[in-house]
Image (cartoon, helix red, strand yellow):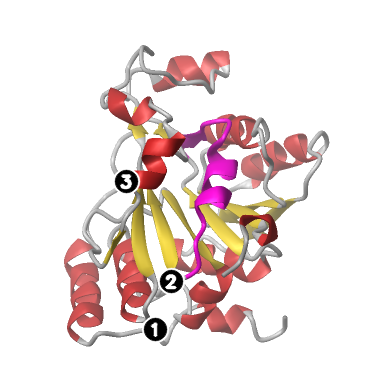
Amino acid sequence: MKSTESVTCSLVITTYNSPEVLDLVFRSALAQSELPCEIIIADDGSTSDTKMVIDAHRRDATIPLVHVWQEDLGYRLAASRNRAIAAARGNYIVLVDGDILLHRDFIGDHRRLAIEGTFIQGSRVLLSQENTPQRLKTKNISFSLFGKGIKNRKNTLRLPLLSKLLSLKTCSHHGIRGCNMSFFRDDCIRVNGFNEDFVGWGREDSEFAVRLINSGILRRNVRFSALACHLGHRENPRRSLADNDRILEQAIIGRLTKCRNGLDKYLENK
């Protein structure tokens, strides 16, 4: 089993044409008590405004900021994540969405809780949609039990000892959310990453988790550590959900451990 000292975290942030929000996420990522070895921006085809935000933070950052961009051909989150994971140098991937603010101990918590043979599903604080514009204006990255606009206050509590006691292994894929997830890069490669047959919003996180679980990598739900705050926004269209549900069902019924259309195509030249 790897000791936590040998775990090197690559933070992967997904984004698409939300430069103001990404700027706030960057501020929280670069204010960590324990920085990742790098930050990789998995960009699903944003315009140059996003690159400008990345370049601005890169000037002062003490760790590499890697911008992995793909052409805008519609919602292709799986491909965007796979490209970023292929580029990662760390042996442990911490995955967040581009609208997630990180507690200052977020990376350190994920690293300390990393255990071989498992992946982590973290929780999130939900921030009201009305509160987000003010945060963007003031550049406020903090969140606490008594903060304004918070819907589920218990998720603001960081209690590391209790967190270790409660982070038990499970084989369930229900409630999987890629907005706060971490896993060993080798495990991700073994199941061939995210399934790029998913087009449009929904279920790519769950199907990835199903294949990890089928391959023997169990889920651990982490509460009261690795805290993250989800900025409120309008939901993505769900036109592809029925088709995506069918792909998920195939992985469950077939007990699949790998997908065909995945990460390996980006690893060929590495």
Give the quadrant of residue 269. bottom right
Q: Nearer the viewer, mark 2 or mark 3?
A: 3
The three-letter amino acid code for the residue at tag 1 is Cys
Q: Quadrant of the C terminus?
A: bottom right
Query: Dot 3: few (<14), some (14–19), or many (≥20) neighbours within 10 Å?
Result: some
Give the quadrant of residue 61. top right
Q: Secondary structure at mark 2?
A: loop
Q: Determine whether label 1 and label 2 are within 8 Å by CB.
A: yes
Residue 232 in sight here: no
Q: Residue at x 52, y 31 (%)?
A: 103
Q: CA distance from mark 1 to mark 2?
A: 8 Å
- Against 137, is 103 above or below? below
Q: Determine whether label 3 and label 1 are within 8 Å by CB.
A: no
Q: Nearer the viewer, mark 3 or mark 1?
A: 3
Q: Can you give x and y, in whole percent of width and height, for residue 138 in the image?
A: 55, 13
Which of the two discs, 1 and 2, labels the residue nearer the N terminus?
Answer: 2
Q: Which residues fall within the magenta stretch?
A: 99-116
Q: Secondary structure at mark 3?
A: helix
Q: CA distance from mark 2 to mark 3?
A: 28 Å
Please name the residue that numbered disc 1 is placed on. 259
Q: Can you give x and y, in whole percent of width and height, for residue 5 in the image?
A: 68, 55
Label annotation for residue 194:
2
| Side (left or right) of 242 relative to 52 | left
Please name the residue that numbered disc 3 is placed on. 166
Q: Residue 60 in magenta?
A: no
Q: Residue 113 in magenta?
A: yes
Which of the two discs, 2 and 3, labels the residue nearer the N terminus?
Answer: 3
Which of the two discs, 3 and 1, labels the residue nearer the N terminus?
Answer: 3
